[in-house]
Amino acid sequence: MAKYMLRSTYTTEGVRGLLDEGGSGRATETEHLIARLGGRLESLYFGFGSADTYVIADLPDNMTAAAIRLAVTASGAVETEVIALLTPDEIDQATRQKVGFRAPGA
């Protein structure tokens, strides 16, 4: 399974829901959502700053990650960004690939 970070920011409506439900309620719902789609929640943290939540999850594939983002964003309560995470070994493999690239204007 691939690992992803979902970084989310609540809308005003989402913050109202969080105040009613609490952080534990949202964490449980997030864990159940990911599990229903064949994934596993690794961690969920709340923050204050540029994002409200940071979720690390193992998901079956990019389509599943996209489906979660679409459903969550369509709720109108949350804006979500999905970031694919790579291990050091995956980066090592990428650095061994030969890529022919010409920079614009070069």
Image (cartoon, grey):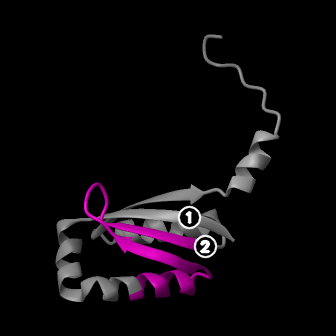
Q: Is residue 99 above or below residue 27?
A: above
Q: Are marks 2 and 1 in contact (CB under 8 Å)?
A: yes
* Quadrant of residue 48 within the rendered picture: bottom left
Residue occupying image coordinates x 55% and y 67%: 65
Residue 102 x, y percent position in the rendering: 70, 19
Residue occupying image coordinates x 21% and y 80%: 17
Query: Which element type, helix, strand or loop, lies under badge 2?
Result: strand
Q: What are the residue bounds of the magenta stretch?
A: 28-57
Say the numbered circle drawn on residue 4. 1
Amino acid type of the residue that numbered disc 2 sits on in the rendered structure = Asp
Query: Which element type, helix, strand or loop, lies under badge 1?
Result: strand
Residue placed most toward the observer, 37 or 99: 99
Question: Is residue 54 highlighted in magenta?
Answer: yes
Give whichever of discs 2 and 1 has the lower sequence position.
1
Q: Which residue in the protein does label 2 denote? A: 58
Say the numbered circle drawn on residue 80. none
